[in-house]
């Protein structure tokens, strides 16, 4: 199994586990919410429904992004993973946060609600916490494993990750565990004080929590959809490899873009030795492209353009992109 296939299988396992857990929990919470009359419990049921929809969208993202390139999409379908993951973030907000906020404000400002059979709610929350914890541990395990493989700290890897699936599951499971604690507090305070105000406040906090998670995930996928630069370590490595080539006098400009999980596009503009003939330049471009894809497993497409480093229009373009660092655009900027 290749590194890429292994990562994809791990993401699928993480998503399937989270989806199964969320579906079971959603049913339990809904039953408990109806029995206890707890707004926080009903909000948590909506939370789990939103998470289940999220897992379906993530599975869609994983499967559709694996389709091979074709004539209409010559760079493949890798960015579909970011599109469906963005929809998952919208789902968390629309079907989870909005319902929780509505239920919370209705409970706080509406007629007082009587609590019945709170013990059922406590039991469901305890079971849900255990199941959510299993899914959360799987997401933690995947992120830790991948961060160690890339020799990064846990949080640095989480910030740089180009696969939204484990990050989405980790964030939503973390929110789920926090939401369960809030629901437990709301249920308990309602029982102790006899006031449904606490139940409503717990629902509002759950809604705010879900809205915040949806914002974080939406911002991540927006950046990936727009076209984020590759890992700076890859950019530096590609630049150094090109500069070390005997045929190249200088790397004038280097652009990279994430085309999907583990798919990086490299566009290099280089100044070749003027003594080289056309055949030598062509041979060097082919050789360097093969070397880069072999050395950096994430690099899947390489384009090398011969340019004169003194060209004023090109220098102006680089200056506009990198500012005052344009004299050494890649080395300084990275």
Image: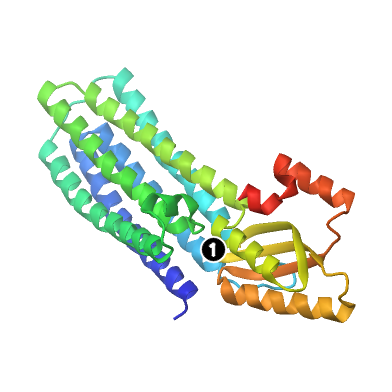
Q: Position of residue 202 (x, y in %)?
A: 27, 30
Figure quadrant of residue 209:
top left
62 on left or right of 172:
right
Q: Position of residue 73 (x, y in %)?
A: 70, 67
In this picture, is 23 found above or below 63?
Answer: above
The residue beneath circle 1 is 261
Whether residue 8 is visible to the viewer of this picture, yes or no, is yes
Total marks placed? 1
Work out whether residue 238 or residue 226 is closer to the camera in this orientation and state it: 238
215 on left or right of 252:
left
5 on left or right of 78:
left
Work out whether residue 275 or residue 198 is closer to the camera in this orientation and state it: 275
Figure quadrant of residue 287:
bottom right
Residue lying at 29% horizontally and 38% vertically, measured from the top left: 42
Work out whether residue 250 or residue 137 is closer to the camera in this orientation and state it: 250
Q: Position of residue 279 (x, y in %)?
A: 86, 81
Neighbor class of circle 1 (other Cα within 10 Å; few <14, some 14-19, many 20+) is many
In this picture, is 302 found above or below 82?
Answer: below
């Amino acid at each position: 199994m290749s590194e890429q296939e292994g990562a994809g299988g791990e993401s699928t396992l993480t998503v399937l586990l989270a989806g199964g857990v969320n579906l079971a929990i959603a049913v339990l919470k809904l039953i408990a919410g109806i029995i206890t009359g707890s707004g926080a419990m009903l909000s948590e049921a909506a939370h789990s429904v939103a998470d289940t929809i999220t897992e379906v969208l993530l599975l869609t993202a994983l499967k559709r992004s694996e389709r091979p390139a074709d004539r209409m999409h010559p760079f493949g379908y890798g960015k579909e993973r970011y599109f469906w993951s963005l929809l998952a973030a919208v789902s968390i907000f629309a079907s989870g946060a909005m319902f929780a906020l509505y239920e919370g404000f209705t409970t706080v400002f509406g007629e007082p609600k009587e609590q019945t059979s709170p013990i059922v709610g406590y039991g469901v929350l305890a079971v849900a916490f255990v199941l959510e914890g299993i899914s959360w541990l799987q997401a933690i395990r995947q992120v830790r494993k991948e961060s160690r493989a890339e020799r990064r700290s846990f949080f640095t890897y989480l910030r740089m990750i180009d696969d939204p699936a484990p990050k989405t599951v980790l964030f939503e499971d973390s929110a789920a565990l926090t939401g369960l604690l809030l629901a437990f507090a709301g249920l308990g305070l309602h029982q102790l004080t006899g006031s449904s105000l606490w139940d409503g406040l717990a629902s509002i906090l759950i809604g705010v929590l879900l809205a915040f998670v949806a914002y974080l995930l939406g911002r991540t996928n927006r950046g990936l959809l727009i076209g984020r630069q590759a890992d700076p370590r890859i950019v530096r490595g590609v630049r150094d490899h090109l500069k070390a080539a005997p045929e190249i006098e200088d790397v004038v400009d280097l652009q990279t873009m994430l085309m999907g999980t583990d798919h990086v596009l490299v566009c290099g503009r280089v100044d070749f030795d003027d003594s080289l003939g056309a055949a030598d330049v062509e041979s060097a471009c082919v050789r360097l492209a093969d070397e880069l894809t072999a050395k950096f497993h994430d690099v899947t497409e390489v384009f090398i353009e011969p340019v004169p480093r003194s060209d004023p229009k090109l220098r102006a373009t680089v200056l506009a992109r990198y500012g005052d660092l344009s004299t050494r655009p890649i080395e300084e900027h990275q």
